[in-house]
Image (tube, rainbow, N blue to C red):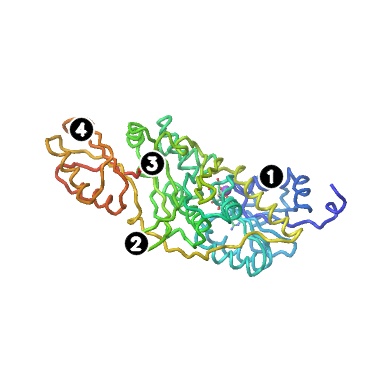
Amino acid sequence: MTEAVQNRPAIGVAVLGMGNVGAEVVRILEENADDLRARVGAPLEIRGVAVRDLSKPRKIDSALLTTDAAALVARDDVDIVVELVGGIDPARELIRTALTGGKSVVSANKALLADYTGELAGAAADAKVDLYFEAAVAGAIPVIRPLMQSLAGDKVERVAGIVNGTTNFILSAMDETGAGYDETLAEAGRLGYAEADPTADVGGYDAAAKAAILASIAFHTRVTAADVYREGITEVTADDLAAAKKFDCTVKLLAICERVVGDGGERVSARVYPALVPLSHPLASVNGAFNAVVVEAENAGRLMFYGQGAGGAPTASAVMGDLVMAARNKVHGGRGPLESTYAELPVASIDDVPTRYYVSMRVADRPGVLAQVAGEFSKRAVSIAAVRQEGAGDDARLIVVTHRAPDRAQSETVAALEDMDAVIKVSSVLRMEGTDD
Ligand SMILES: NC(=O)C1=CN([C@@H]2O[C@H](COP(=O)(O)OP(=O)(O)OC[C@H]3O[C@@H](n4cnc5c(N)ncnc54)[C@H](O)[C@@H]3O)[C@@H](O)[C@H]2O)C=CC1
Ligand SMILES: N[C@@H](CC=O)C(=O)O
Ligand code: NA
């Protein structure tokens, strides 16, 4: 190491939260201190770590611990704040205070960034500091930086993939070993994949927040979590996974962000739902807590990003990448990319987006039922791609897979089927993705 690097003043780092991710960030900062100093051009020194419970045993010098996150953020010797407490409050205020006080911020907080990137990025721009959040989407996988920087000269058409590790872990286990939903969710919590409130995972809220962040960056348009159509995996059953197999498919919770062009011009669709995916599609073999994001751009074509989407160490890797970037900028000058929302595209309703449906229903076992069911689809111009009939008598089941049609036509057909005398129960409705038709 050159003498100049050795003598540069240290960059002071405050870490807020020492849970799954924060503890790994602290470990890497301590274990890799020499390499980090060489890469940044100055030492990275932890000034303090904000925690809730001082009595908990932790692998850190206890003199660095504090329960007063606000005071830590305000310290003059802190240059960069790493926010890993999660949630909206007090994270939002802590980040805002840090930015307005001239500190760069690194955060993994997708719930916050999905709704407040505008406010926070504005504060960062005003104070001429950085706001980095690579860890907020798909854990360790570099996806924010490629979209913001590597593809800044291209036109992104679509970003789609598996962006929640917990639900992918649950669906994979249900599919592969028949493991139960509750026990697998508890295991995801123990492994540090699940959110503090796992409803965010299984309800699709976490994936929706990530979809909002991805869509905003990909389409240079501000998209918030409320703009994202969302369904979780709580209704997906072992029967659905078994039925999917009969169509050479599996079930994945997908986040899809794409440009849709219709009568009203170009719009942005952002949506999250469990969907049948053909086994031959690359996303079908993404299992466990792994994530994968497929980006389609006008000139680059199709790019696929794959890796660990959740867990303390993988997520900390992404946080550390951002921390090194922010620290280099402090040492050598320069700034990270600013928020870009110039395109201001309107957000499309799910009703207008062309989707494919898989509908499984218990039906009366009598002549003419298939024709009546088919009639409801055809009335709404929804074309049927495949029909499978199973069982007989009280157990007669009809499974219909459609071609693409506006989602409104598909959902209205399902509502009409539910009202038919011949249909005893519509037991499952899922969309199908990863096919061209
Ligand atoms: N665990 C994962 O796989 C991933 C997590 N994230 C995000 O990273 C952030 C942290 O996640 P985890 O470490 O898993 O959560 P966690 O719940 O394990 O850790 C958060 C820690 O912050 C502490 N905390 C909360 N409020 C505080 C306050 N006001 N002052 C001091 N400490 C406070 C909590 O006591 C807890 O120890 C969240 O925003 C999460 O969404 C992002 C990607 C992956
Ligand atoms: N709970 C999240 C953690 C990473 O973002 C997930 O399961 O993906
Ligand atoms: Na990432």
- Tags 1 and 2 in contact by the CB under 8 Å rule? no
Amino acid at pointer 2: Asp
Q: Who's the residue at 73% across and 55% down the image?
A: 328
How crowded pointer 3 is (Cα within 10 Å; few <14, some 14-19, many 20+) is rated as: few
The x and y percentages for residue 97 are 63, 66
- Tags 4 and 2 in contact by the CB under 8 Å rule? no
For disc 2, the marked residue is 263
Amino acid at pointer 3: Thr
Q: Residue furthest front?
A: 299
Amino acid at pointer 4: Asp
**Cα separation between marks 1 and 4:** 57 Å
For disc 4, the marked residue is 395
The x and y percentages for residue 39 are 75, 49
Disc assigned to residue 27: 1
- Tags 1 and 4 in contact by the CB under 8 Å rule? no
**Cα separation between marks 1 and 3:** 44 Å
Q: Who's the residue at 67% across and 56% down the image?
A: 66
Q: Earlier in the sequence, mark 1 or mark 4?
A: 1
Viewer-nearest residue: 130 or 425: 130
Q: Earlier in the sequence, mark 1 or mark 2?
A: 1
As helix, strand or loop, the secondary structure at mark 1 comes to: helix
For disc 3, the marked residue is 435
Q: Earlier in the sequence, mark 4 or mark 2?
A: 2
Q: Earlier in the sequence, mark 2 or mark 3?
A: 2
Quadrant that contains the C terminus: top left
Viewer-nearest residue: 58 or 393: 393
How crowded pointer 1 is (Cα within 10 Å; few <14, some 14-19, many 20+) is rated as: some
As helix, strand or loop, the secondary structure at mark 2 comes to: loop
Q: Earlier in the sequence, mark 3 or mark 4?
A: 4
378 to the left or right of 34 = left
